Amino acid sequence: MKRIIASIMLLLSAIGFTQNTENPSQVKTKAAKKLAKKFLRKHGITGMAISVSQHGELIWSKGFGYSNKKQKIPVKPDTTIFRIASISKSITAVALAKLIDDKLIDLDSSIYNFIPDYPKQIYDITVRQLGGNLAGIRHYKNNIEYALNKKMSITEGLDLFKSDSLLFEPGTQFNYSSFGYVLLSEVMQKATQVPFNTFVSDTIFTPLNMTHSMMDASDVTVPNCTHFYKNSLLKKHILASPVCNEYKIAGGGFLSTSEDLIKFGNELISPKIVSKEALSEIITSQHLKTGERTGYGIGFSIETSKNSTPKYYHTGGGVGASTILMVYPEEELVITVLTNTTGISMPDFGNELEKVFID
């Protein structure tokens, strides 16, 4: 009997030892999964994908909830396609860096060199100011503009704001503007003489093997694309209203998966399609004419991690989409979170994941 009890005690000790010897990566992913489930429940998120890579290798990729609530189709981070909202600006920025390398655009040149027919303003505007939200171009006036369900080309989309006066002298203030990125994409397609969507697909998506990334075309059914949801005061998981994002593709009109965005994020760490010199132009904070730092380069917010190391990131908020992409070059870490639900604040959750994955 004593031998039996001793054997049982030894077995229990061995089990306890095994459970307490999880490797650091397992501890991190377990903590992240717990945070993610809590975040999903708290905000009534229908579906979410989280992917994390370090040193160029995917270390955690997980789907939560549903891409189609009615049919109970689960989210799969490698194939479920989401609206990425304003992370699109980051993709536009890297495409712009490619144009810098190809000497097709000088960031400090006037936008009128490329679009001479655009209505003249009291001040000139440079490409750099446009990409850095320093040009004085306004943002959406209201929810109607934000959720506009009218299919337009980029050029047609300029009509929404091109006759409006600038909000301020370029370079004197920071004003986040998705319309500014509509104008930037018009400049880029004039510089290349190639449609903006085609240029991005050929120079970013194809070479980075982002096979599930594309323009959000309102008249095309995309396989594996999530449904898009919103929460009302009385009921959660309601389908969001249709929206047309073609004209604002550069600022908020791309579709992607969380794993595709990991590939994109790693381009900032180990650039293969753009030079380090061109990349530095978009990941360096701009300054106002007073010298004040804006904390935004081109297509990326520029901050520091909890360890005071560099951090490049962008959040996104669109119809049926709340997203975040975070890149930590010194740690060689990329974290991306995509959801299919409108109006979810992402920065705090992003910071929680940062604390988990950065030692």
Image (cartoon, helix red, strand yellow):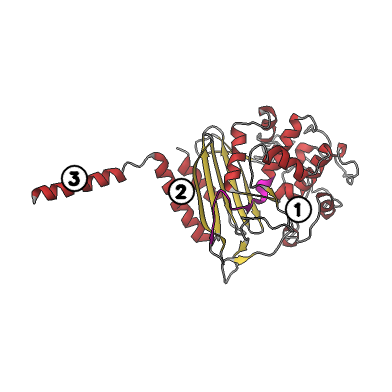
Residues at marks 1 and 3, CA–CA distance in whole angstroms: 65 Å
Please give left or right for residue 18 compared with residue 294 in the image: left
Label 3 Cα crowd, 10 Å radius (few <14 / some 14-19 / many 20+): few
Q: Residue at x 87, y 52 (%)?
A: 163
Q: Position of residue 228 (x, y in %)?
A: 63, 60
Give the amino acid type for the residue marked by disc 1 in the picture: Glu
Q: Quadrant of residue 143?
A: bottom right
The local secondary structure at tag 2 comes to helix
The local secondary structure at tag 3 comes to helix
Q: Quadrant of residue 127?
A: top right
Q: Position of residue 61 (x, y in %)?
A: 51, 47
Range shown magenta: 73-88
Residues at marks 2 and 1, CA–CA distance in whole angstroms: 34 Å
Please give left or right for residue 173 compared with residue 26 in the image: right
Q: Residue at x 61, y 58 (%)?
A: 226
The residue under label 1 is 246
Q: Between 326 and 10, which is closer to the camera in this rendering? A: 10
Quadrant occupied by the C terminus: top left
- Residue 177 visible within the image: no
The residue under label 2 is 32
- Residue 344 visible within the image: yes
Q: Residue at x 9, y 49 (%)?
A: 2
Q: Is residue 341 above or below residue 135?
A: below
Task: Kindly check if marks 1 and 3 are in contact, taking CB atoms under 8 A apart as contact.
Answer: no
> Closer to the camera: disc 2 or disc 1?
1
